[in-house]
């Protein structure tokens, strides 16, 4: 029989708001699998590849805002969760990882499928617990139930993140034939009220009035409907400039500067100097734009305030002077107008309009390249849909192009660690927990690297995958360093001849190939139709031609600015 404290893990998870569980098959984890699978209030899915399973769980937690539970067997299965665990840690996404393990006396005894699993995720986990292996004393039951509540509370406490419970299990793993599981009704539940990170305006209002040129830089964050009008009102009453990468999800605001990569390509130091802020206000996580990071490190503000309720704060721009422990909503609501410089915001707006007009004209007239393809795809994305951006060039192209003001699209990207390894899976997790059309914009290397994200029985029909296939890791042609090396093609680009047709066939996904902009224009409307079903749209380009086209774009941009 399965011991009752293990059965009750599922009950505690359900009582504390968990909705989704992703497990991978195994024998040692059978007690956990059976307990979760038989619980009436939990949605349980099986994904055989643990790396894909973990990223799918990440996508679910990103979309729902609630912890997703992961369950795997002992041994290297737990190690395969590590990339997604690290991503969740740096992207601040709540996961509860349950790893089955051998009992402690069998560790390091050459028993099968056994590794050292305690603290297996090292410093990339908020907290790691070890479940009791002996329940002969009643306090062990109290300990086990308390532990699960504490783990879930920790996963959602700001900043959210992954929490691990390693669970040593002894045989027997399976209930006897016909044996029913009973979920205890009197399990211990510990609830934790979220902290209220409010702010007294008097704390910062007086100092705020000393600054004239205010620049707000928003980092990666989920779309937050309540924040948008607050930022808009703040910008209007203070003439502050708001800059946001695509992953900041501020693109709906008309005044957001969204083409900073283009703006900061301007070679004239006099113009760049006019964009320098007195006060830099930041919130959110990382940004994509290297140009913006380099600019702010060179043209440093007199003061830099970062708004963050709790947790470690990074000094990304090397100018941090104050950490304000508040939510962005509370901060921007509390500040009244200061001694703002309207010329400062006008300078940013003027160069933003030039960059926007140039990009729109260039991408509408340019020949086939990845930049023009991304522009056409983003232009036709359905309203109220989700967009996932794979790393390498897909996320960079999308950030250069941007979304139009007012476009209601929620943007996600695995920018916690910026790896290509889980883009498909994260998008699948999002699509499984959102009714909206969910689009992944990816490159060929990232797509093929994570094909197992499609290897399961839960293909979401709202999934759309757009692949930029240049048969190589094309980013290396655009980076100073590798592009000048004779080893570029063989050892950096790592050319490959694959296309996604067979993958689409294997998993029952609609497939369309495009070799020209005309092909693309014909395909897009049908591809994004609400009733089209899961689809892959693969656009073939040449790596060398893409590099030449991007160089031409940058050359013409400098003239336009």
Image (spheres, rainbow, N blue to C red):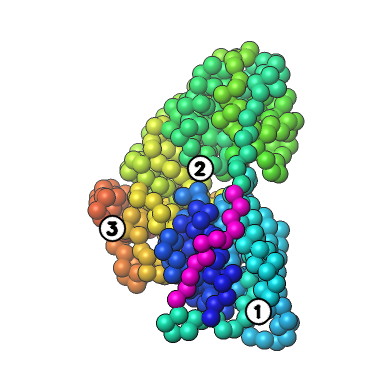
Q: Residue at x 62, y 14 (%)?
A: 338
Could you say whether the residue bearing mark 1 is in a helix, strand or loop? Answer: loop
**Mark linked to residue 78:** none
| 112, above or below 217, in the image | below
Left or right of 159, for residue 561: left
Residue highlighted by disc 1: 102
N-terminal of the two: label 3 or label 1?
Answer: 1
* Horizontal and vertical percent position of residue 402: 45, 39
Q: In the image shown, does 470 or 234 lie closer to the viewer?
A: 234
Q: Nearer the viewer, mark 2 or mark 3?
A: 2
Tag 2–tag 3 contact (CB < 8 Å): no
- Specify whether residue 439 is in view: no
Q: Mostly what secondary structure, the magenta segment? A: loop
* Mark pair 2, 3: CA separation: 26 Å
- Mark 3: secondary structure: loop
* Residue 207, position as x, y percentages in the image: 71, 19
Residue 474 against residue 274 in the figure, above or below: below
Q: 376 and 215: which one is in front? A: 215
Q: Quadrant of residue 537?
A: bottom left
Specify which label sits upstream in the sequence, 2 or 3. 2
For label 3, the residue is 533
Question: Please, which residue is most extreme toward the top here?
Answer: 339
């Amino acid at each position: 029989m399965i011991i009752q404290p293990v059965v009750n893990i599922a009950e505690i998870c359900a009582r504390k708001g968990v909705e989704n569980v992703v497990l991978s098959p195994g024998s040692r984890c059978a007690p956990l699998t059976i307990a979760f699978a038989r619980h009436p209030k939990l949605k349980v899915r099986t994904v055989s590849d643990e790396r894909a399973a973990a990223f799918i769980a990440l996508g679910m937690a990103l979309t729902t805002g609630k912890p997703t539970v992961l369950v795997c067997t002992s041994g290297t299965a737990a190690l395969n969760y590590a990339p997604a665990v690290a991503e969740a840690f740096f992207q601040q996404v709540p996961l509860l990882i349950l790893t089955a393990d051998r009992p402690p006396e069998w560790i390091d005894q050459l028993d099968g499928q056994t590794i050292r699993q305690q603290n297996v995720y090292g410093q990339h986990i908020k907290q790691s617990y070890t479940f009791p292996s002996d329940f002969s004393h009643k306090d062990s039951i109290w300990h086990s139930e308390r532990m699960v509540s504490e783990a879930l509370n920790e996963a959602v406490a700001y900043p959210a993140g992954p929490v691990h419970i390693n669970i040593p299990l002894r045989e027997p793993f399976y209930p006897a034939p016909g044996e029913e599981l009973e979920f205890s009704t009197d399990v211990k539940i510990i609830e934790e009220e979220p902290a209220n990170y409010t702010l007294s305006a008097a704390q910062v209002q007086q100092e705020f009035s000393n600054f004239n040129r205010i620049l707000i830089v928003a980092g990666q964050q989920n779309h937050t409907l309540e924040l948008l009008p607050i930022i808009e009102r703040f910008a209007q009453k203070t003439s502050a400039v708001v800059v946001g990468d695509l992953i900041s999800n501020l693109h709906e605001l008309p005044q957001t500067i969204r083409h900073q990569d283009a703006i900061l390509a301007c070679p004239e130091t006099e113009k760049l100097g006019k964009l320098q802020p007195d006060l830099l206000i930041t919130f959110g996580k990382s940004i994509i734009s290297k140009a913006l990071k380099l600019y702010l490190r060179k043209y440093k503000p007199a003061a830099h305030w970062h708004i963050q309720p709790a947790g470690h704060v990074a000094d990304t721009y090397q100018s941090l002077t104050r950490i304000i422990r508040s939510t962005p909503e509370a901060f921007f609501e509390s500040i009244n107008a200061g001694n703002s410089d309207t010329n400062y915001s006008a300078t940013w707006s003027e160069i933003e309009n030039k960059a926007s007009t140039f990009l729109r004209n260039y991408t509408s007239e340019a020949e086939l390249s990845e930049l023009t393809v991304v522009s056409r795809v983003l232009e036709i994305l359905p309203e109220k849909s989700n967009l996932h951006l794979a790393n390498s060039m897909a996320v960079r192209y999308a950030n250069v192009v941007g979304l139009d003001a007012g476009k209601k699209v929620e943007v996600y990207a695995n920018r916690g660690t910026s790896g290509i390894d889980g883009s498909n899976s994260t998008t699948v997790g999002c699509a499984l927990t959102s009714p909206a059309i969910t689009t992944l914009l990816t490159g060929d290397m990232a797509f093929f690297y994570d094909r197992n994200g499609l290897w399961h029985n839960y293909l979401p029909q709202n999934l759309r995958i757009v692949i930029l296939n240049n048969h190589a890791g094309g980013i290396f042609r655009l980076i100073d360093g590798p592009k000048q090396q004779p080893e570029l093609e063989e050892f950096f680009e790592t050319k490959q001849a694959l296309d996604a047709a067979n993958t689409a066939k294997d998993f029952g996904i609609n497939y369309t190939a495009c070799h020209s902009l005309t092909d693309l224009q014909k395909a897009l409307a049908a591809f994004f139709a609400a009733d089209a079903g899961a689809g892959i749209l693969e656009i073939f380009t040449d790596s060398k031609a893409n590099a030449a086209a991007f160089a031409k774009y940058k050359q013409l941009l400098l003239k336009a600015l």
